[in-house]
């Protein structure tokens, strides 16, 4: 009687998962698995133990399995049969143990080899799935693993650049020479070593700013993190800075005298969802596609989450959006990165950047110093893009950057 086998998709998933467990990118950091290997005389571990790992239970639909002893013998047999097709793995004759077919290299040599066959790909959406990237890059070469590094500052979030490890350095080089589009965005591909250099500089700058901020403001109040994005409007037709023109009469002047409520717990403003424009301004410009109101900005940004406040002056071309949750700010930035040029607001394009680090602290500090007013300031200094040139956003490392927005509030403070 023929031995039952795993379905094609399940077999691929199981093989990929076990190869990852014993792979160069995982095993050096997996203390549990390394201990089990070192305890073994033949550098192999129990296949039942491997099958009891959570991801393997998911692939094999072992919902009732809690420990290695619970894995059915029939499952072990079909998994062993699948793993024997791998040149990277070795399976014992009785099918009960599995291990690497080659010894793990020394750390320095291992790192060199890993770097040579790993590339960095960006920009990617913050909610991108590893499996989707594995399938996408698997069209061009065999993928060993996909890693999603965390943001340098906002450690909860993916930084927007994925690290794709291929099975051979030649495969990585071939993919680097491709022009690829993923989820509608043209990818910037670079060797992992280049990514590491950028990352190291970002970490150093973040640490420097963190120490500077700590030393200069030991008594400074805590403030919400990750709620702010800054935007700049550009004309969708001319590509010019969106200096909006309108009648220069008293009817269009905004009401600057409304007061914010203050959250007693955090000392931060509890804004209305958005400050309402002067009623005459709304009635005059509501249908004017060449003049952006705060209500227009609210309508665009509220799809990412609850908008607490729109910090913007009518006929201006720059401003801030304050969200209720940091996830909303992340989604807004990701959508701007994914879109060609930014988010559409009437006849304008809004280029969105996160406000982090020192700029974020200064924003909240200045806001608290002007709690009788709605706005931090009327002047915004915009520096967008990979190298902060001309407001153009680069694709290489902006999502990982801890720099975020520059110190826009300094100008307002001096005003």
Image (tube, rainbow, N blue to C red):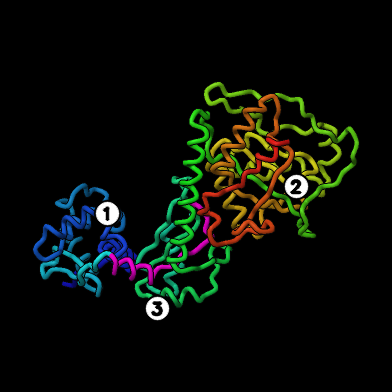
Q: Is residue 343 above or below residue 13?
A: above
Judge by depth and name the residue closer to the eye, 335 or 30.
Answer: 30
Picture quarter containing residue 339? bottom right
* 83 lies left or right of 13: left
Residue position marked by numbered label 1 in the rendering: 57
Judge by depth and name the residue closer to the eye, 94 or 327.
Answer: 327
Check disc 1: other Cα within 10 Å, few if <14, some if 14-19, many if 20+.
some
Q: Is residue 332 in sight in this rendering? A: no
Nearer-N-terminus badge (3/2): 3
Residue position marked by numbered label 3 in the rendering: 170
* 357 lies left or right of 230: left
* Alpha-carbon span between mark 1 and mark 2: 53 Å
Residue position marked by numbered label 2 in the rendering: 317
Q: Residue at x 83, y 36 (%)?
A: 281
Residue 52: % across, % down: 22, 53
Secondary structure type for disc 3: helix
Q: Are marks 3 and 2 in contact (CB under 8 Å)?
A: no
> What is the magenta range?
108-127
- The N terminus - image quarter: bottom left
Instruction: Report the mark closest to the observer, 1 or 2.
Output: 2
């Amino acid at each position: 009687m023929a031995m039952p086998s795993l379905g094609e998709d399940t077999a691929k998933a199981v093989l990929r998962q076990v190869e990852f467990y014993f792979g160069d990118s995982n095993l050096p950091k997996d203390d549990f698995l390394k201990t089990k290997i070192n305890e073994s005389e033949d550098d192999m571990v129990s296949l039942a133990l491997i099958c009891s790992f959570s991801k393997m239970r998911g692939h094999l639909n072992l919902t009732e399995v809690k420990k290695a002893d619970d894995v059915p013998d029939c499952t072990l047999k079909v998994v062993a049969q699948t793993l024997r097709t791998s040149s990277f793995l070795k399976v014992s004759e009785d099918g009960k143990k599995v291990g690497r077919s080659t010894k793990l290299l020394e750390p320095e040599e291992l790192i060199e080899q890993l770097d040579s066959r790993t590339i960095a790909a960006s920009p990617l959406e913050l909610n991108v799935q590893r499996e989707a990237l594995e399938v996408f890059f698997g069209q061009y070469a065999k993928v060993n693993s996909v890693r999603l590094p965390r943001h340098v500052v906002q450690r909860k979030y993916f930084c927007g650049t994925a690290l794709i490890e291929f099975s051979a350095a030649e495969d990585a080089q071939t993919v680097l020479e491709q022009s690829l589009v993923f989820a509608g965005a043209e990818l910037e591909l670079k060797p992992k070593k280049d990514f590491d250099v950028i990352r190291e500089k970002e970490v150093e700058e973040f640490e420097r700013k963190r120490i500077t901020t700590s030393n200069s403001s030991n008594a400074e109040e805590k403030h919400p993190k990750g709620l702010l994005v800054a935007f700049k409007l550009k004309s969708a037709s001319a590509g010019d800075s969106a200096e909006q023109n309108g009648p220069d009469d008293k009817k269009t002047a905004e009401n600057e005298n409304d007061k914010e409520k203050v959250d007693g717990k955090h000392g931060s403003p509890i804004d209305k969802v958005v400050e309402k424009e002067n009623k005459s301004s709304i009635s005059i410009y509501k249908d004017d596609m060449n003049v952006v109101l705060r209500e227009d900005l609210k309508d665009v940004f509220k799809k990412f989450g609850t908008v607490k406040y729109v910090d913007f002056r009518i006929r201006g071309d720059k401003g801030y959006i304050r969200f209720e949750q940091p996830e909303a700010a992340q989604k807004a930035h990701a959508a701007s990165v994914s879109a060609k040029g930014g988010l559409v607001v009437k006849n304008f394009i809004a280029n969105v950047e996160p406000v982090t680090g020192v700029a974020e602290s200064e924003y909240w500090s200045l806001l608290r110093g002007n709690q009788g007013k709605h706005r931090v300031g009327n002047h915004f200094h915009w520096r967008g893009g990979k190298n902060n040139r001309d407001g153009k956003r680069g694709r290489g490392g902006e999502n990982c950057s801890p720099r975020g927005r520059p110190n826009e509030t300094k100008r307002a403070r001096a005003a």
